[in-house]
Amino acid sequence: MKKVVLMAVLVLLISSSYVFAWRGDCSSCFTKTNDIESVKMFQKESSQLRDELMIKKFELNNEYAKEPKDQSRIDTLRKEILELRNKIYSIADKYNIYLGKRGKASCVKYCFDCRW
């Protein structure tokens, strides 16, 4: 009896993981390609911000590795990372560059743009 229950739970967990892992893909409805010149301008303008973002991520990983953890420093770094990402995304929007999913709302926006 325990084996049957265990197998049922295992099958349920595996099947539910597939359901939750597939959330739909905007690439199926988002057919826009990025213009090469726009990408070059985006890379040039966002280069410093992307470098800062990488450094902040390394700093955050180092803070997580420390014992005891400095939660205020972690919160500050997470906020700075979010601000840098938002700046990078705004530059991408300026050049009409698609950087991938930015959350459900963004995905829906792009899907509506192509009449999904």
Image: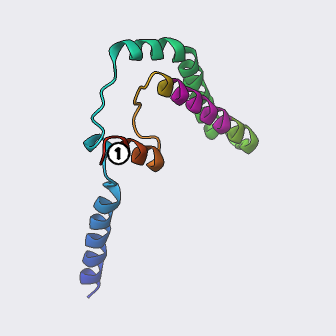
82 or 62: nearer the viewer:
82
Q: Position of residue 20 (x, y in %)?
A: 35, 60
Q: Where is residue 57 in the image (x, y as percent from the top left)?
A: 57, 30
Instruction: Determine the main secondary structure of the stretch shown in magenta.
Output: helix
Q: Which residues are drawn in magenta? A: 77-91
Residue shown at 61%/28% (left/top)? Answer: 56
Q: Check if residue 11 falls in the magenta segment.
A: no
Image quarter of residue 23: bottom left
Tell whether 35 sits left or right of 59.
Answer: left
How many numbered discs, if any? 1
Q: Where is residue 60 in the image (x, y as percent from the top left)?
A: 62, 34
The residue indicated by pointer 1 is: 111
Q: In which quadrant is the N terminus drawn? A: bottom left
Which amino acid type is marked by label 1? Cys
Q: Is residue 30 above or below residue 45?
A: below
Tell whether 86 sits left or right of 30.
Answer: right
Q: Is mark 1 on a helix, strand or loop?
A: helix
Tell whether 8 sits left or right of 52.
Answer: left
